[in-house]
Amino acid sequence: MLASACGSTSSPAPARATALADTDAATPNPSAPLSAAAARTIQRTAKFTVTIPPAKPTLALAGRTITIDPGHNGGNFTHSQQIARLVPDGNGEKECDTTGTAAPDGYRETDFNWDVAVRLRALLKAGGARVVMTRDSNTGVGPCVNERAAIGNRAHSDVAISIHGDGGPPGGSGFAILAPAPIPSRSDQAIISPSAHLALKLRESLLGIGLHPSTYDGRHGIAPRTDLGGLNLSKVPKVFVEVANMQNAADEAPMERASFRERVAHALAAGLTHYLQRG
Ligand SMILES: [Zn+2]
């Protein structure tokens, strides 16, 4: 969540299920008698050909709108004045945005957030969802936190998720899901209960990939917050996910691995899907 600097951008090709139709060229008319050679050909084909089924829309995701907010932005590091200006956060004022944290070796939170978001987008779209991103690159500036909420609202999202890595104490570790808590105006009242439900589903899916709840933030991995414009101003169910603590070496090392980011994206997709499956 907090400030720091450095790192590089990576924007992987989204892992997306692809339909491959290269199997059946040697398959004869099933009613015709087979020659020995044809039988051997089919045997070889059957043994060495793998068919990947096309991704099918799931009932929970098809036609649903999901807003993904990859926290911060790569250009924030060089536009400190622009992101320091105050904007309304629903419960007062807050800086437009921050740079986000970075690991001691320079790997930036914004790069992690962006990469996981792109992977998550691919998974949700493959499931039939309409996905709206709050930013379309990892090299721009902003948008401000209030605008990030507004993007999710304007899209009439069924659900929204903000992806982060935390800048916690080096001795602390684990994920925290930041959920909206009642603010004095009570303008977030309608999203509190569904967002809490979303937090539970995401906690379940993050536990499912072997992550543990934060040792320093919230209770059992969930932290109610009233100071985040991205939550206070949201009209749609929304949480922030602090996937791990980038200041803790054991937490952070996997964050630099594409395989870990892919697992996180799958867990977030599963949590969102389970949330949308509720009655
Ligand atoms: Zn952050």
Image (cartoon, rainbow, N blue to C red):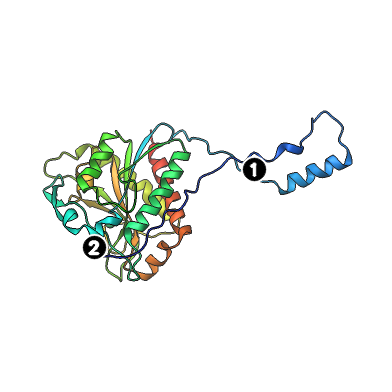
Identity of the residue drawn at 56% across and 38% down: 54
Is residue 254 left or right of 195 when viewed as pictured? Answer: right
Along the line of sight, which residue is nearer the eye, 93 or 202?
A: 93
Under circle 1, the secondary element is loop
Residue 84: image x %, image y %? 16, 56
Q: Which residue is mark 1?
A: 51
How many numbered marks are there? 2
User: Which is nearer the eye, 103 or 265?
Assistant: 103
What quarter of the picture does the N terminus occupy?
Answer: bottom left
Q: Is residue 236 visible?
A: no
User: 194 and 104: which one is in front?
Assistant: 104
Q: Position of residue 150 (x, y in %)?
A: 23, 39
Residue 49 on image: x %, y %: 69, 46
Residue 240, given in percent of the width and then of the height, sits at: 29, 50
Local secondary structure at mark 2: loop
Q: Residues within 10 Å of mark 2 (few under 14, many from 20)?
A: few
User: Which class describes the residues within 10 Å of circle 1: few (<14), some (14-19), or many (20+)?
Assistant: few
Label 2 – label 1 distance at C-alpha: 46 Å
**In the rendered image of this protein, does residue 155 appear above or below residue 240?**
above
In the image, residue 267 above or below residue 250 = above
| Residue 3, numbered label | 2
Q: Residue at x 29, y 54 (%)?
A: 73
Q: Which mark is residue 139?
A: none
Amino acid identity at mark 2: Ala
Q: Residue at x 46, y 44 (%)?
A: 123
Name the quadrant where ligand 1 sits.
Answer: bottom left
